Image (tube, coloured by chain):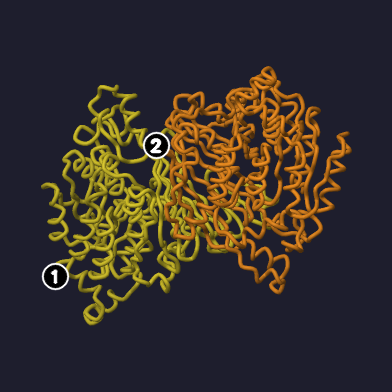
Chain colours: A yellow, B orange
């Protein structure tokens, strides 16, 4: 029996019970080892491989990419980590299908360009493989629905690897929210405010900056990411801001997002950057970018709350995910590192430093895994998100960020485009849970388990 | 010839030229003395009277209110300042009409409840009197149009007394904008984030707090302001945030606001406050408040920029007008007292303190009048706005914040209500300039004159 077949069988209720009851129904040790494949071994995929290689129980059985250089870097990372050489799928854009069908995978990690995430996730689940996909999980409404339908049909999970949900401050604030520090939540803010001009353009040799090339003449992310700024005007990258506040607002679990509006500024930053670095006669100076430099999205929730998201990637500015969490009793704001809680903050209507709160409400996960998390990328966030992916597979349990989260976070991309193209018209947000949000219970960050 | 009649005549082109050419066309000294009336002598009106009394050339000829206590306080202020006793109009809600018709006023200052501003402004202009009205100038779209039509018809001005336009940091940032520090503007934020619970409720004796009464049992602002939170769900007070960014974005003068969306949270803060202080059996605990605790409005401008406004007056929080000004070259943000300018800020993508910039770009008005402004209310802002009102009358010139500003700032109130009541539908913003915004030139804060 091939390993994959075994997994598929063991997760089917009834069948598993007669064959291997102790394995199939033991929550903590249903499986000792985990077979993982990775699609996309660019810089992000390589980093994930480096982290994954630290898990002795994880077998990285196969990798897939179309770029020989990236594949070699990936193989070196695994070799240096003392891992066996994985099987390599590199025979064109569609070879990932062969990997999904041929290999006995428990899970696949998808770190490819955005436009591939949904398709690869769908094929993985249909092949009986659990999915961890980089953000966003999909960029069309139809693909969002397909992900839900396919996950429900196959019983495989589709976890969106939204690492910011685990950022130490953010998950501490989730802890504060759950302990009632802010009272009833009213308004949250998040966003992606990150000057990506040196990511969207480079010299074709190094990943960041040094030139104004992209697409075929670019390198790394500029090869594919920049094209989205040409073709689309919307919040292209909402999940880093929305993921964390979704957990605080119990989205899909007692609450849901009902409608949104998006409004975009004019588009200037990318063109200006090309002209400034490449001169006005550079061929790329003729490229027209649809993406407004700053996109503001406002979301209304079923329980009354509002969420404001900003997408701001084409302009010179300090990095900030724009977090603000406000309730009937107080407010936290990231950009000034401050908090105010009525009746607790020492001076009425005066901010105090968030520092003491962050220590007091440090999340159990961080307390438990601080040592492992440090140095594990993006301030430790990558450690937790990857661990949750692996543990969910190992323990055969639903992941703490599931397919409903994946699509409700990702659907903001196409819906914001729709709103902007219609003068900020209000756009309904689908209920991907089909009404189950009313009874579903929160699943994220409840314990120190994952 | 009654004084008022004289003024009306002298402002009519042609006529004035033949009668008193030197007076009518001399920009700086067209009039030596100014006759002012004040409608509304509540706490705000009294403060304005106290400031106005410092101008030797201003004769406060009449005041109007319906509250004897407030009138007496106002009279005492003028007496203490050595000003002659004004005529008092106090014979009911409509007595202001008599004042406008009977007195020879050059200008009237309106500091009444919001719902009276438009009507009083209209009647004043129709009586040949220039208007300075507290914010907002109107709360319906129809009244906004009437103000424009009436100002155009009568040749009288309607200045909105939006003092924040003169706040030292804000007008320094305007200076930075005009000197190109931020490049081309992309996105601005403003708002009114001010815990007004102790303003909306009091004990009926003191103006701020101490109880949960309002309306007839309340005192000062709670007598009228709170009712708006019961009847309306929208951005009730947009002008403090919008006024300053309007000047930066050249609204009505090269640019205009085209459409908006507004989204409101649930309403909790006012009810909770009543229950907390008055107990759940207090009669006011049954009052239902329409106003969402936080209202987020996003505006799109003809030149591409976006404006985000927040209205947040029912919750415990530090005061903040939420300013952010962002362009292609940099960003200023009030809440962290910081600025970032590409190529100038010492560290790439790292905030620096705004302090040096505020000194370097201190506005000429502040440099000239710093001494007089200090101690003149709201950090000096009131000095400048009142001075501009008086000087505009004295010099017989259009005010630096005119009727088009008055209505484009104020119309956000009813339009945001409309948007919210239609699930954040996009609502068109009228062009009150009837196309003149395309050729009108900026008028605010150009010199150290006003």
Badge 2: chain ID: A
Q: Classify B323 as above or below A151.
A: above
The answer to whether any part of residue A64 appears in the image is yes
Q: Residue at x 33, y 48 (%)?
A: A421
Question: Dividing the image into 4 quarters, which one contains the C terminus of chain A?
Answer: bottom left
Dot placed on the residue nearer the N-terminal end, 2 or 1 = 1
> Residue B178: where, in percent of width, then height?
51, 26
Q: Please name whichever residue, B16 or A158, is drawn nearer the observer in this view of the structure.
A: B16
> Residue B257: where, in percent of width, then height?
46, 41
Q: CA distance from mark 2 to mark 1?
A: 51 Å
State left or right for residue B148 relative to residue A102: right
Q: Please name whichever residue, B260 or A408, is drawn nearer the observer in this view of the structure.
A: B260
The answer to whether any part of residue A355 appears in the image is no
Disc 2, SS: loop
Same chain? Circles 2 and 1 = yes
Q: Residue at x 57, y 26 (%)?
A: B357
Badge 1: chain ID: A
The quarter of the picture where residue B321 lies is top right
State left or right for residue A15 relative to residue B111: left
Q: Please name whichever residue, A411 or B46, is drawn nearer the observer in this view of the structure.
A: B46
Q: Residue at x 29, y 51 (%)?
A: A53
Q: Residue at x 38, y 53 (%)?
A: A425
State left or right for residue B237 relative to residue A388: right
Q: Classify A409 as above or below B256.
A: below
Residue that label 1 marks: A1
State left or right for residue B113 relative to residue A392: right
> Residue B297: where, in percent of width, then height?
49, 50
Q: Which mark is residue A195?
A: 2
Q: Please name whichever residue, B343 or B173, is drawn nearer the observer in this view of the structure.
A: B173
> Residue B49: where, in percent of width, then height?
78, 39
Is label 2 or label 1 in front? 2
């Amino acid at each position: 029996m091939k390993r994959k077949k075994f997994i598929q069988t063991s997760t089917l209720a009834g069948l598993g019970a007669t064959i291997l009851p102790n394995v199939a129904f033991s929550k903590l040790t249903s499986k000792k080892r985990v077979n993982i494949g990775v699609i996309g071994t660019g810089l992000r995929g390589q980093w994930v491989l480096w982290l994954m290689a630290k898990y002795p129980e994880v077998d990285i059985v196969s990798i897939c990419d179309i770029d020989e250089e990236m594949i070699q870097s990936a193989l070196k990372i695994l070799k240096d980590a003392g891992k066996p050489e994985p099987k390599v799928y590199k025979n064109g854009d569609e070879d990932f299908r062969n990997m999904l069908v041929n290999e006995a995978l428990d899970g696949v990690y998808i770190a490819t360009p955005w436009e591939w995430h949904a398709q690869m996730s769908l094929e993985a689940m249909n092949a009986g493989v659990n999915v961890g996909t980089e953000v966003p999980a999909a960029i069309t409404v139809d693909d969002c629905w397909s992900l839900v339908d396919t996950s429900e049909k196959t019983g495989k999970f589709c976890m969106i690897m939204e690492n910011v949900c685990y950022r130490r401050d953010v998950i501490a604030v989730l802890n504060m929210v759950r302990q009632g520090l802010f009272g009833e939540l009213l308004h949250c803010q998040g966003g992606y405010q990150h000057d990506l001009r040196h990511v969207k353009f480079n010299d074709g040799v190094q990943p960041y900056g040094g030139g104004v090339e992209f697409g075929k003449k670019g390198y790394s992310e500029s090869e594919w990411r920049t094209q989205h700024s040409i073709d689309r005007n919307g919040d292209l990258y909402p999940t880093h801001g929305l993921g964390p506040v979704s957990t605080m607002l119990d989205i899909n679990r007692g609450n849901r997002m009902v409608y949104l509006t998006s409004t975009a500024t004019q588009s200037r930053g990318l063109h200006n950057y090309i002209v400034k670095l490449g001169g006005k006669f550079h061929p790329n100076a003729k490229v027209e970018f649809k993406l407004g430099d700053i996109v503001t999205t406002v979301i209304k929730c079923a329980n009354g709350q509002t969420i404001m998201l900003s997408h701001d990637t084409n302009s010179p500015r300090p990095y900030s995910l724009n977090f603000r969490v406000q309730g009937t009793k107080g407010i936290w704001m990231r950009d000034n590192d401050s908090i105010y809680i009525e009746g607790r903050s020492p001076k009425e209507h005066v901010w105090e430093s968030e520092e003491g709160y962050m220590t007091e409400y440090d999340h159990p996960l961080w307390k438990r895994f601080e040592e492992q998390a440090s140095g594990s990328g993006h301030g430790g966030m990558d450690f937790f998100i990857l661990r949750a992916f692996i543990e969910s597979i190992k323990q055969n349990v639903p992941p703490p960020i599931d397919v409903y989260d994946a699509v409700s976070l990702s659907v903001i991309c196409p819906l914001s485009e729709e709103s902007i193209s219609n003068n900020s018209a209000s756009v309904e947000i689908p209920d991907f849970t089909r009404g189950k949000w009313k009874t579903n219970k929160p699943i994220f960050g409840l314990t120190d388990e994952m």
